[in-house]
Image (tube, helix red, strand yellow):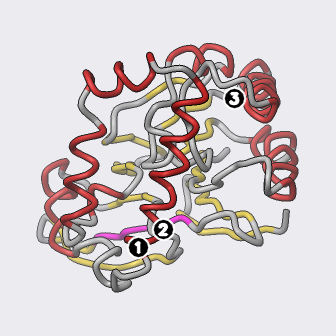
Amino acid sequence: MATLFIADLHLCTEEPAITAGFLRFLAGDARKADALYILGDLFEAWIGDDDPVPLHREIAAAIKSLVDAGVPCYFIHGNRDFLLGKRFACESGMILLAEENVLELYGRKLLILHGDTLCTDDTGYLAFRAKVHQPWLQKLFLALPLFVRQRIAAKMRSNSKAANSTKSLEIMDVNPQAVVNAMERHRVQWLIHGHTHRPAVHQLTANGEPAFRVVLGAWHSEGSMVKVTQDDVELIYFPF
């Protein structure tokens, strides 16, 4: 059997092909897995579990069908859907995880996370992240009328695109020392993350031994997953 990892689907009503690809994945490869881990940015944006967008209900039902079929689904928040809460988790059957988790799979010890916290050179983003992750601010935002939250979210996305357009690719990528620090803090030789949209398997040294960082791809024109089995850790691409 195998455990599957995905991230950065950025589901939204404007990209029906990605949604269709994800639904096929849930009905196909995911049904054969021991478990499915979604490492953040499942949705392009999330302004509250009370948002009545039909897409959210469709995705919740599809994930719940997978869970009901015996495949547990776990979720780590991304920078786009960090407000996804217990209501949606209950509706979908997903189990919400902390931002960093260590798994023991088939004899391997792996650290999983979304990946944005590893981008320590992007000080502007990390300062913004620290603000929006304050519980009191999140509670205040979620108490606003839905149409107000929609306007704020649209403005924030616009500001984010403008800010990112002036940043170098290096700044928005992970910091190598931050990667090593995280792996040594958790005493692991394997790390799986998303966020950067730069799928690859990187070899490095951590804890004085060979180590590997596996980066998931974003679902732009094709699907991307990491498949962990007894024999291997594979980065796999597949058509929608």
Label 1: which residue?
164
Q: Report the quarter where the C terminus lies.
A: bottom right
Residue, x 70% and y 68% (percent of image)?
220
Q: Badge 2: how crowded within 10 Å, few (<14), some, or many (20+)?
A: few
User: Which type of secondary structure does the marked residue at label 1 adopt?
Assistant: helix
Q: Nearer the viewer, residue 226 or 219?
A: 219
Quarter of the image where one finds residue 223:
bottom right
With 1 as the anchor, is 19 left or right in this view?
right
Q: CA distance from mark 1 to mark 3?
A: 37 Å
Q: Main secondary structure of the magenta part?
A: strand
Residue 215 is inside the magenta segment: yes
Confirm or deny contact between disc 2 and disc 1 (CB under 8 A): yes
Q: Which mark is residue 161?
A: 2
Q: What quarter of the picture does the N terminus occupy? A: top right
The answer to the question of whether label 2 and label 3 lie on touching residues, with beta carbons closer than 8 A, is no
Residue depicted at 81% across the width and 30% down the height? 54
- Give, as a three-letter code, the residue at label 2: Lys
As rendered, which of 68 and 97 lies closer to the eye?
A: 97
Q: In x, y percent, where is residue 177? A: 15, 72
The x, y position of residue 183, in whole percent, is: 22, 58
**Which mark is in front, 2 or 3?**
2
Residue denoted by label 3: 71
Between discs 2 and 3, the one toward the N terminus: 3
Q: Which residues are magenta?
A: 211-216
